[in-house]
């Protein structure tokens, strides 16, 4: 997506620990989940029958937790899943088959095997929103909203657990009630340590927690956006592949700008200055407007600015389209993957865009 102006540009405080998102300490209690402001998902005390996760679903959860994102966790053997397997295999020195062979399965269990699903209690703080049930399609109407929030709790839960509302319905049932204090089956994307990043005027700490993204991530020495593979790769100082994320990049109208660029800065929960004149598929008669921050912003929850004018790396309001649609030239990731990349890069990080 071509970019007009996003404000403000908040600089990154990078961490450098391993990127797995397991939180330390004991899991939250049911009482903690019932707290009015809690975003912590306690284990549910329920008699619900176990749900056996198929191998692909299990692998997707582990890949996500280890930093090799399959995009949305849906149990399907799509292109993003195969790319995630190849990236993980490359990073572990395995044959890059793109298949869930025995050696890859063993490597995915490093650090101990965890169940692919959890029954959780929906915390009160998470359930209270605010939500925007009648989310408008037109930018002029979106500009009237105080924030571009989720449409409903199910959509918010889907982003928190890196999946889709449709998958959540399948894991539970169409009749399952969704609300504070209710048990709910989700992919096992764990709670993270409560983010505390100093001054936080844009609410980034809460955004990370609501997306299940740890504030401390391994530091990127460079990122590579590979058009042929449809992924964004993260390398460390030893030039080792340490993370990978599926991406939507460019179109015939706005091709990916091939070349070596640099990260200028990171805007978290940014405003979006929407200028129809910069979009080939929008009438120039439309009015330019400013859209408030939120996960359903056209750039999602974060904008990573490049030294190529009007281009950047950002999130999306439609995670299921990543790798399956075109962009307006920029690199688009799911909100949870974009947030993770934002915690890895800093101003000056090289960004190599290649065919």
Image (tube, rainbow, N blue to C red):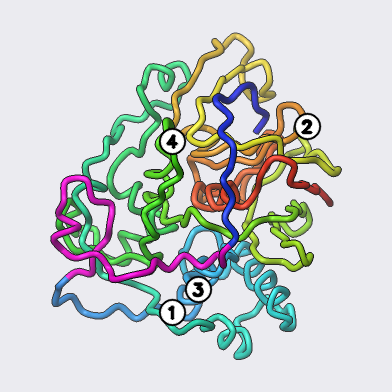
Q: Earlier in the sequence, mark 4 or mark 1?
A: 1
Q: Position of residue 245 (x, y in %)?
A: 62, 57
Question: Badge 3 local density, few (<14 within 10 Å), some, or many (20+)?
Answer: many
Question: What residue is pinned by disc 2?
Answer: 308
Give the CA separation, mark 2 to mark 3.
35 Å
Q: Which is more foreground, mark 1 or mark 3?
A: 3
Give 258 or 7, whichever is nearer the viewer.
Answer: 7
Distance in Å between CA atoms under marks 1 and 3: 13 Å
Label 1 crowd (10 A; few <14 / some 14-19 / many >=20) = few
Residue position marked by numbered label 1 in the rendering: 54
The answer for how far apart the CA atoms under marks 4 and 2 are is: 29 Å
- Residue 79, placed above or below residue 254: below
Which circle's residue, 4 or 2, is located before the other in the chain? 4
User: Where does the magenta region start and end?
Assistant: 17-44
Quote the CA–CA distance across marks 3 and 4: 33 Å
Residue 133 found in image quarter: top left
- Residue at the spot 43% in from the left edge and 48% down from the top edge: 208
Residue 270 in the figure: left or right of residue 305: left
Residue 33 falls inside the magenta stretch: yes
Q: Which sits earlier in the primary sequence, circle 2 or circle 3? A: 3
């Amino acid at each position: 997506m071509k970019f007009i102006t996003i404000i403000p540009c908040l600089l990154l405080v990078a961490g450098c620990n391993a990127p797995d998102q397991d939180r330390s300490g004991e899991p939250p209690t049911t009482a903690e989940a019932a707290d009015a402001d809690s975003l912590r998902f306690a284990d549910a005390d329920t008699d619900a029958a176990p749900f056996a996760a198929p191998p692909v679903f299990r692998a997707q959860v582990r890949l996500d937790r280890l930093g090799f994102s399959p995009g949305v966790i849906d149990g399907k053997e799509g292109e993003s899943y195969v790319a995630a397997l190849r990236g993980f295999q490359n990073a572990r020195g395995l044959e890059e088959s793109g298949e869930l062979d025995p050696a890859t399965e063993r490597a995915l269990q490093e650090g101990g095997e965890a169940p692919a699903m959890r029954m959780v209690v929906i915390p009160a703080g998470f359930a209270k929103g605010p939500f925007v049930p009648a989310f408008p399609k037109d930018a002029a109407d979106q500009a009237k909203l105080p924030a571009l929030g989720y449409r409903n709790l199910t959509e918010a839960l889907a982003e928190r657990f890196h999946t889709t509302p449709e998958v959540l319905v399948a894991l539970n049932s169409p009749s399952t009630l969704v609300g504070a204090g209710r048990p709910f089956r989700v992919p096992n994307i764990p709670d993270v340590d409560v983010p505390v990043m100093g001054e936080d005027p844009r609410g980034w700490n809460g955004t990370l927690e609501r997306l299940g993204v740890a504030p401390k991530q391994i530091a990127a020495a460079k990122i590579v956006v590979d058009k042929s593979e449809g992924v964004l790769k993260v390398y460390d100082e030893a030039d080792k592949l340490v993370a990978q994320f599926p991406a939507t990049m460019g179109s015939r109208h706005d091709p990916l700008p091939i070349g070596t660029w640099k990260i200028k800065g990171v805007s978290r929960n940014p405003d979006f200055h929407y200028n129809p004149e910069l979009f080939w598929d929008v009438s120039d008669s439309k009015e330019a407007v400013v859209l408030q921050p939120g996960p359903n912003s056209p750039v999602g929850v974060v904008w990573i600015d490049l030294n190529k004018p009007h281009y950047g790396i950002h999130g999306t309001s439609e995670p299921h389209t990543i790798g399956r649609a075109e962009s307006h030239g920029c690199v688009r990731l799911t909100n949870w993957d974009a947030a993770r990349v934002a915690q890895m890069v800093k101003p000056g990080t090289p960004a190599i865009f290649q065919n």
